[in-house]
Image (cartoon, rainbow, N blue to C red):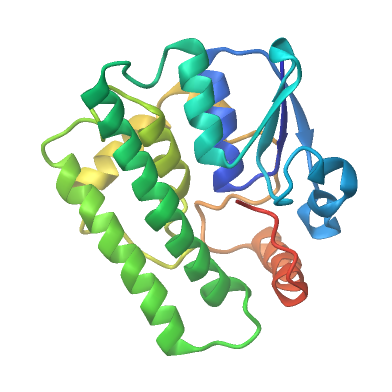
Amino acid sequence: MIDLYTAATPNGHKISIALEELALPYTVHALTLSALQQKEPWFLAINPNGRIPAIIDRSEDDFAVFESGAILIYLAEKTGRLMPTDMKGRSRVLQWLMFQMGGVGPMMGQANVFFRYFPEKIPPVIDRYQGEVKRLLRVLDGHLKDHEFLAGDYSIADIANWAWVRTHRWSGVPVDDMPNLQRWLDQIAARPAAQRGVLVPPSDVDLTKASGDKADAFVKGARNMVETGGSGKD
């Protein structure tokens, strides 16, 4: 059994999708980021960085893993699925996983902050981050022109990137001119495990949509977190 400490964010959804794909039994512990539960001592004992997601593998002497990319690798290696075992195949998956961890996630996260949450609108900064998000998504689109998935068969690299890219509207970045990316987004969205994973934990806000009353309330809460420096997502 795995204990999953998470919230309804792209980084959190990476892990719930993977757990659903792997059919591993898990218990959800949803943290309220706006209440700074991720900074409480009990959680810092699991993840010293004070961010979600994190897991405890109860079947492995209560082994704790934090950082979403590290968790994905751990789960893939634990089960022997969603990542090849040969050196080159494993490397391809890790390259695209690192592409998300070092590029897509951070840039979309910054675009979200300055486009959605930061109290002052600074157009050059918004343009900078949205432009970099667009560039990264074009890299994915170009690669997917000749590849069904990012690194051979469906893998943790697809899960990690998809969990973020599906929220491109929230970052204010359209992908209408990226047909290969759209095909890949739709293909993964049709997977039952992905459909279940993005509902863990339940949330009133759909980050694939750009507006709405609940979205406005979510933005207000996130803005408070930005102003107090309490971000809780890895």
- Locate residue 95, reporting x and y percent: 30, 40
Q: Residue furthest right?
A: 41
Please identify the quadrant where the N terminus is shown: top right
- Locate residue 184, reporting x and y percent: 28, 37
Closer to the camera in the image, 225 or 191: 225
Q: Residue furthest left?
A: 146
Left or right: where 201 falls relative to 156: right
- Locate residue 12, reporting x and y percent: 61, 41
- Picture residue at 64% right of the left edge, 53% below the top: 233
Q: Give the quadrant of residue 134.
A: bottom left
Closer to the camera in the image, 59 or 203: 59
- Picture residue at 80% right of the left edge, 59% below the top: 34
Q: Is residue 67 visible?
A: yes
- Picture residue at 72% right of the left edge, 42% below the top: 47
Left or right: where 120 falls relative to 75: right
Closer to the camera in the image, 73 or 131: 73
Q: Give the quadrant of residue 145.
A: top left
Q: Is residue 176 visible?
A: no
Left or right: where 87 falls relative to 7: left
- Picture residue at 47% right of the left edge, 18% below the top: 77
- Locate residue 79, reporting x and y percent: 49, 11
Q: From this view, report whether residue 222 is shown above or below residue 88.
A: below
Count of numbered badges drawn on the protein = 0
